[in-house]
Amino acid sequence: MEYLPVEVIGNILSRLGAARDVVIASATCRKWHEAFRKHLHTLSFVSSDWPVYRDLTTSRLEILITQTIFQTTGVQGLMIHMDDVDEFSASTVIAWLMYTRETLRELYYNVRTTPNINILDICGRQRLETLALAHNSITGVEPNYQRFPCLKYLSLSHVSISALDLSLLLTACPKIEELELLNPEIAMSDAQVTVELSSPTLRSIYVEAISLDKFILEADSLVKLHLKDCALEVFELIGKGTLKHFKIDDVSVLHLDIGEAIENLEIVDVSNFTITWPKFYQMISRSSKLRQLRLWDVVFDEEDEIVDLETIAVCFPQLSHLSLSYDLRDGVLHYSLQGYSQLENVLMLELGWTVINDLFSHWVAGLLKRCPNLKKLVIYGVVSEAKTHEECQMLANFTSSIVQLMRKYIHVEIQFEYE
């Protein structure tokens, strides 16, 4: 170990992450302490890393973090997540950031201070590439002054910010590629809450737990769009057909528009969502490159609507992964299995139920016939703790029918997932 270059030791210490572990390891010898002071790249203070953090007074914790940070000279990644601490002194936190900002490339910051400090003022115009803020407020964004010329990843979690400041902040990041908005508190300037964001470089956006009247996103380079647990009246994406991955989970939206140029879509993942199948199909029908389609726990707007497998087989010839779970109703299941076109490239098939009935077995059998090259079948089901005799018999009949059915498809691996 004594022949290891000090720079290599610095890399080893950087991979430890937790500040306590780094400090203990640096006490090994003078060489390791030198590596800690001059060649440490990452440092992490997370309240869950060490139970003693919770027992220390705020002032003692501030001293401990200050002493550790001020012994280093080139930290590039700094994480400070102190969920259990009420509030730090603003002057102390400013000192940490001012000391490290010239070398900092990544900052993960979840700290409450008195008074609130403006991270943008301190870290703007530097070489920061990753910025993740939590439980803070952002006001009065000045994109010309608070500019982030190198920032590629921005995450705002439980951050209070106005719609205008959010738009300006994105403008202040000319190289932004990935944006995450988790339960942001959007300040209302008028009765209608509208967010309009624009970025020519944005490639991925994840939005969770947001409630808005209108969300308009203009992103010419967007590849991935993920909406989760959102309530929106209008969502509109304006782009140039670069979207490849579209995912929505437990979203309420009256008008959804992901643009007309969606020929490059490869993954569509929809769950816990009410859809009008003809309208939804029309939206994605030109996506001939689609490889993965997931419609899970979806509810149809009209009772007689059902996913048309013939249409899926014809319009999505490259489909290799198909996942379906929705309420099967007698009288319409027949129509979903009509046609003769094969899903020749489907290798993975996932099927699920919420309420088991006799229709499910027929549905599984019909789908297996349409997938001649299938490699794996996964069946998901919900099994309640208390079951009547009829329900137990239904589950037993289903198991027997699947065992009998799979004898015809011995080349297919089958897996059951119950909850």
Image: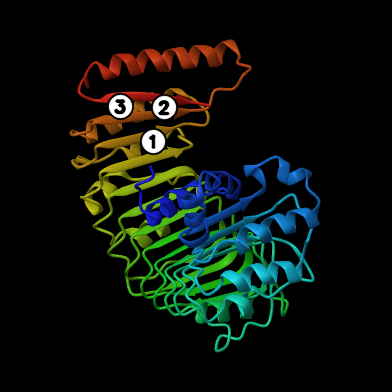
**Residue 144 x, y percent position in the rendering:** 55, 89
- Callout in the foreground (3, 2): 3
Disc 3 to disc 2, C-alpha distance: 10 Å
Front-most of 277 and 89?
89
Quadrant that contains the N terminus: top left
Q: Position of residue 143 (x, y in %)?
A: 56, 85
User: Which residue is pictured at 63% across the width and 57% down the height?
Assistant: 68
Q: Is residue 96 visible?
A: yes
Quarter assignment of residue 140:
bottom right
Which label number is shown at residue 365? 3
Image vertical order of residue 401 relative to residue 178, above or below: above
- Determine whether the residue tagged by mark 3 lies in a helix, strand or loop: helix
| Amino acid type indicated by mark 3 | Ala
Mark 3: give few (<14), some (14-19) or many (20+) Cα within 10 Å.
Answer: some
Q: What amino acid type is highlighted by mark number 2?
A: Leu
Name the amino acid type tagged 1. Leu
Which one is in front, 273 or 244?
244
Residue under pointer 2? 359
**Quadrant of the rendered image containing residue 134:** bottom right
Q: Disc 2 and disc 1: Cα gap in Å?
A: 8 Å
Alpha carbons under labels 1 and 3: distance apart: 12 Å
The mark that comes first in sequence, 2 or 1, is 1
Circle 1 is placed at which residue position? Answer: 333
Give the SS element for disc 2. Answer: helix
Q: Secondary structure at mark 1?
A: helix
For marks 1 and 3, the one nearer the N-term is: 1
- Residue at image position (42%, 13%) is 397
Q: Is residue 64 left or right of residue 398?
A: right
Is 388 in front, or is 175? Answer: 175
The residue under the point 73% across, 58% down is: 63
